[in-house]
Image (cartoon, grey):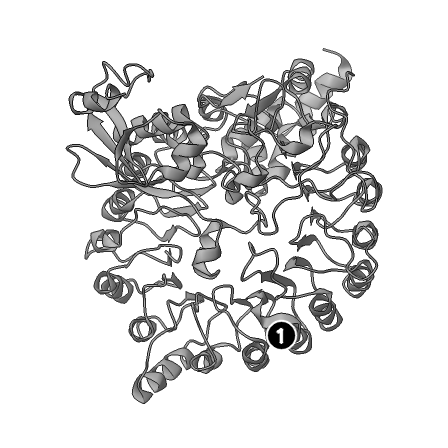
């Protein structure tokens, strides 16, 4: 050992001190960096990590995780590629959490939190979870599937210390409402309950009793089966809620009931987020006004409001930062947003009728422009529209240069600027040039390679890019792969990028989480070449009715230290 | 790099006929080539202009759970059919649109009901298996799963029934 190296060893921190210091670091990215400094830091970091985040469940295996981290208390795990939300992934593709739970049960008996996204969770898994971790506190299942009433019953019955149960947008047809009755009478610890996406009737009796004995409840999001009268009875028990998701607003109320609801809402002084509001109309919406002053997040994506109704509601929401609406509010409704919500940071406009390509209703560039004029702090937008112009987008980003997430969906594929009939290249050129903090971008409309040249040239902070029905040649995809240094997720569908484009990213994919390409011009040969050159990537071809021996219709590429999947279904080919 | 595919997407007015690279979902039969391969694959074929209301799978990218707001009739429809199994107390429901062929469907059924179905043969059906899958078609007749092409099955299947092998034997050999 030379002099300098010896000096370094002698003066390095004792490991207890290093561990103490590292235990203050929460961010998994920072911890990853710390672990790369040297062996001592790697060891200290692995002994002190308690929150595990795995962005792609197939990038690593349960065994590898168990070996490296001995003391995990909370886990966040993500499974299927995002396009599975839109039915592009066949059933039984994978991302089953069970093998992970078996390992957690063995190695992390003090596990307290599990947050899953886009994973398949069976009743058997939920039962294992419920019985294996005595201190278990928080379960969050976002966009998951595979479980029924039985699994939830197991959780309710056995998790004595549960504080959070959130099944946000997980869809399973067979879930009944009986599981609520399985929480024992002695159970009082619940703080967060979100079952808004359940399609079935919930036992109101059980829910009411649960709410009345859980004094610490601060988040309650019920499903559509709960009516207004029932909502009022719940609200009087928990006026201190910070997040409320109502049930259906479609009910004939007496004057007395109306007044009671108005009082109940006015007593909710701490409400920061409000959602649900199924079928809310101008008749009953006014009684929520009393709770709106403290709202920072208003989710109206289940209430088909018209512009007038929105215009009357918004002035009461003086603290609003995030707003989700349906395009029934129209450009006029968005004008009201621009004039009433100066603090707005996030806007999402969802389409009422996305599949009717001939429909001309909804919002246009005028609405978006109006919002940008009144809301200079806009950072996040998701906008579904049928018409857009380059000029409008240029002006919008001049008004709001701080966008970090810009997701524009012009619903007719390959739709040009509706005034000039030109491609929408300049729009996205402006977005990437002006919004230097841009991290996520979804493009749409008619786009040539020029748009991708702009993205490659200017979007230096871009991490996630979604592309559909775009590009004029392989060069488009190449520009992005060569130009965006921070790119982590690239998802492409229905573009004509081919093998040359795919292979131009050879050196890039190991720095990314994943690449998805479907309905492009890839062949099995091209994918095999990629797999051969890059052994640490998993190159998977999903075969469906569009595939044959040469055409690779759905390709999923991701880096992994766990090698090829061991649980591939017959229709997934690992190359 | 061999040019496996030579497709160019041009702007409106150039010699390629259509501006977009649409893929239609399996139900819109008028857009599906006979072998299911998308029209854009071959450079020589002119891309068929899709029918005005052709639905593209998964587009626009709206999450399926939002169905309660959109007019339910107009949502991207699943093809849900009930599945019963002889001897089981309750039925299941599956969306056959999510499966890409018979083997995929049968594997899923085997998984769901924890049984084995075995190999299909045209002559002998599912001979030798404990269970055989059958379905009720548009005419109300009980048919053996696997006899007709997959697309035809998808459009005519109204309900699935997993029968005990012994009971299903009559279905296979009537032809």
Residue found at the very far top of the displayed protein: A1
Nearest to the observer: residue A121 or residue A356? A356
Q: Indicate the position of residue A119 as horizontal and vertical percent values.
A: 44, 38
Task: Give the structural element (helix, strand or loop) at label 1.
Answer: helix
Picture quadrant where residue A533 is located: top right
- Vertical relation: B30 (above or below) A431: above
Q: How many marks?
A: 1
- Vertical relation: A241 (above or below) A310: above
Residue B129 appears in the picture as rendered? yes
- For this view, does B46 lie left or right of residue A422? left
- Vertical relation: A281 (above or below) A454: below
Nearest to the observer: residue A413 or residue A394? A413
- For this view, does A555 lie left or right of residue A462? left
Residue A512 appears in the picture as rendered? no
Q: Indicate the position of residue A157 as horizontal and vertical percent values.
A: 23, 47
- For this view, does B171 lie left or right of residue A52? left
Residue in view at x 68 percent, y 78 percent: A339
Q: Which residue is mark 1?
A: A333
- Vertical relation: A46 (above or below) A384: above
Picture quadrant where residue A250 is located: bottom left
Q: Indicate the position of residue A262 as horizontal and vertical percent values.
A: 39, 83
Q: Indicate the position of residue B84 as horizontal and vertical percent values.
A: 23, 37
Badge 1 sits on which subunit? A
Residue in view at x 22 percent, y 23 percent: B131
- The quadrant of the rendering that contains the N terminus of chain A is top right
Residue in view at x 46 percent, y 72 percent: A270
- For this view, does A285 lie left or right of residue B49? left
Label 1 crowd (10 A; few <14 / some 14-19 / many >=20): many
């Amino acid at each position: 050992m030379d002099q300098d190296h010896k000096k370094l060893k002698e003066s390095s921190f004792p490991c207890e001190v290093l561990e103490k210091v590292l235990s203050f670091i929460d961010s998994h990215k920072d911890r990853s960096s710390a672990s790369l400094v040297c062996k001592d830091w790697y060891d200290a970091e692995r002994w002190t990590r308690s929150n595990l985040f795995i962005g792609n469940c197939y990038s690593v295996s349960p065994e590898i995780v168990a070996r490296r981290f001995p003391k995990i208390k909370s886990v966040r795990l993500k499974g299927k590629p995002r396009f599975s939300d839109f039915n592009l992934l066949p059933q039984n593709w994978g991302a089953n959490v069970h093998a992970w739970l078996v390992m957690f049960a063995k190695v992390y008996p003090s596990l307290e939190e599990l947050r899953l996204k886009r994973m398949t969770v069976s009743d058997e898994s939920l039962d294992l979870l419920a019985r294996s971790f005595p201190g278990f506190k928080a379960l969050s299942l976002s966009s998951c599937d595979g479980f029924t009433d039985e699994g939830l019953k197991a959780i309710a019955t056995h998790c004595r210390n549960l504080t959070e149960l959130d099944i946000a947008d997980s869809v399973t047809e067979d879930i009944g409402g009986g599981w609520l009755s399985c929480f024992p009478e002695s159970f009082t610890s619940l703080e967060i309950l979100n079952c808004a996406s359940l399609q079935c009737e919930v036992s109101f009796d059980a829910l009411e009793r649960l709410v009345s004995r859980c004094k610490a409840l601060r988040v309650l999001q019920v499903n559509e089966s709960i009516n207004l009268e029932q909502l009022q009875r719940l609200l009087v028990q928990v006026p201190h809620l910070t997040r409320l998701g109502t049930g259906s607003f479609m009910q004939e109320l007496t004057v007395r009931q109306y007044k009671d609801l108005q009082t109940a809402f006015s007593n909710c002084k701490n409400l920061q987020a409000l959602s649900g509001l199924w079928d809310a109309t101008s008749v009953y919406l006014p009684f929520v006004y009393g709770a709106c002053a403290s709202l920072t997040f208003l989710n109206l994506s289940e209430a088909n409001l018209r512009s007038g109704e929105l215009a009357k509601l918004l002035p009461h929401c003086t603290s609003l930062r995030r707003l989700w609406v349906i395009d029934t509010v129209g450009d006029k409704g968005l004008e009201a947003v621009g004039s009433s919500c100066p603090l707005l940071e996030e806007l999402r406009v969802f389409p009422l009728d996305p599949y009717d390509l001939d429909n001309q209703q909804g919002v246009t560039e005028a609405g978006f422009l109006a919002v940008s004029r009144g809301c200079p702090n806009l950072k996040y937008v998701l906008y579904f529209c049928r018409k857009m112009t380059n000029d409008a987008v240029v002006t919008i980003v001049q008004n709001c240069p701080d966008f970090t997430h810009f997701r524009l969906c012009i619903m007719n594929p390959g739709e040009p600027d509706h005034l000039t009939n030109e491609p929408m290249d300049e729009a996205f050129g402006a977005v990437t040039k002006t919004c230097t903090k841009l991290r996520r971008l979804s493009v749409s409309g008619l786009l040539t390679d020029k748009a991708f040249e702009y993205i490659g040239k200017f979007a230096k902070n871009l991490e996630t890019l979604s592309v559909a029905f775009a590009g004029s040649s392989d060069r488009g995809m190449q520009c992005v792969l060569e130009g965006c240094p921070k790119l982590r997720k690239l998802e492409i569908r229905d573009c004509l990028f081919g093998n040359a484009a795919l292979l131009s990213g050879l050196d890039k994919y190991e720095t990314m989480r994943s690449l998805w390409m479907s309905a492009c011009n890839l062949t099995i040969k091209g994918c095999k070449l990629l797999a051969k050159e890059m052994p640490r990537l998993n190159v998977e071809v999903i075969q469906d009715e569009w595939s044959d021996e040469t055409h690779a219709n759905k390709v999923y590429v991701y880096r992994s230290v766990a090698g090829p999947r061991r649980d591939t279904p017959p229709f997934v080919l690992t190359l | 790099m061999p040019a496996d595919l030579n497709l160019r997407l041009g702007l409106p007015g150039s010699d390629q006929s259509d501006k977009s690279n649409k893929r239609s979902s399996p139900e819109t039969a008028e857009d599906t080539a006979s072998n299911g391969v998308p029209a854009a694959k071959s450079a020589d074929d002119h891309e068929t202009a899709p029918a005005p209301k052709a639905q593209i799978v998964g587009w626009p990218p709206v999450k399926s759970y939002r169905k309660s707001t959109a007019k339910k009739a107009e949502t991207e429809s699943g093809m849900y059919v009930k599945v019963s199994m002889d001897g089981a107390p309750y039925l299941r429901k599956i969306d056959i649109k999510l499966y890409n062929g018979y083997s995929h469907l049968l594997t899923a059924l085997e998984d769901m009901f924890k049984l084995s179905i075995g190999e299909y043969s045209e002559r002998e059906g599912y001979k030798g298996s404990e269970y055989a899958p059958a379905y009720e078609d548009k005419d109300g007749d009980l048919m053996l799963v696997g006899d007709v092409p997959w697309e035809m099955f998808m459009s005519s299947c109204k309900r699935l029934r997993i029968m005990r092998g012994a009971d299903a034997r009559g279905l296979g050999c009537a032809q």
